[in-house]
Image (tube, helix red, strand yellow):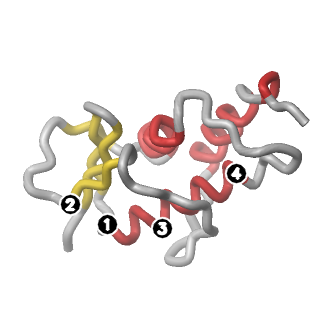
Amino acid sequence: MTYAVVRNGSESLYLELEPDVVMDLLRDITHRYESLFTFSKPIYKAGKGAFLFSVLRDGYGAQCCDNSIGLPIIDLATTHISGQKGALHDWSDEIAGRVIAKAFASTLGNIQE
């Protein structure tokens, strides 16, 4: 089994998931977050990569790492991730849901109709 590292800038997270499963998770997180914006375009205050990184770290407990040790790297700065409900797994998680909801709530003052 090949695991993956997710990178955002100089920070990296180690996930004990195969790269295609990590991509499914990232698409699902994006879908859940963007579906909250029913009246405007999605807003990513610190950028989409930073948002996804924080949900993986704070919501799913992914561990920070210093070196990819030859593992596949998913670079959030260069990888296009569009929202899509998870096809490989039900990624619903209460803690991750709270992180997503908190990020959404932080944008409410910035939404323009």
- The disc, 3 or 4, on the residue closer to the chain's N-terminal end is 3
The residue at the far bottom in this view is: 88
Q: Nearer the viewer, mark 4 or mark 1?
A: 4
Q: Which residue is mark 1?
A: 19
Q: Name the side, left or right, on which 66 lies relative to 77.
A: left
- Distance of label 3 from label 2 (alpha carbons): 15 Å
Query: Could you tell me the amino acid type at mark 1?
Result: Pro
Residue to which mark 3 is pinned: 24
Tag 2 secondary structure: loop
Q: Which mark is residue 31?
A: none
> Which mark identifies residue 34?
4
In the image, is residue 32 above or below residue 86?
above
Amino acid at dot 3 = Asp
Contact between labelled residues 1 and 3, with CB atoms less than 8 Å apart: no
Which is nearer the eye, 8 or 22?
A: 8
Real-space Cα distance between discs 2 and 1?
7 Å
Contact? badges 2 and 1 (CB < 8 Å): yes
Query: Where residue 75 appears, x then y in whole percent?
Result: 32, 49
Judge whether 106 appears above or below 5 on screen: above
Q: Which quarter shows the N terminus?
A: bottom left
Q: Secondary structure at mark 4?
A: helix
The residue that disc 2 covers is 72
Q: Relative to the observer, which residue lies in front, 89 or 32? A: 32
- Distance between the Cα atoms at labels 4 and 1? 22 Å
Give how far apart the Cα atoms at labels 3 and 4 are.
Answer: 15 Å
Whole-angstrom CA distance, mark 3 to mark 1, is 9 Å
Q: Which mark sits nearer the N-terminus, 4 or 1?
A: 1
Q: Are marks 3 and 4 in contact (CB under 8 Å)?
A: no
Q: Earlier in the sequence, mark 4 or mark 2?
A: 4
Q: Position of residue 86 (x, y in %)?
A: 57, 70
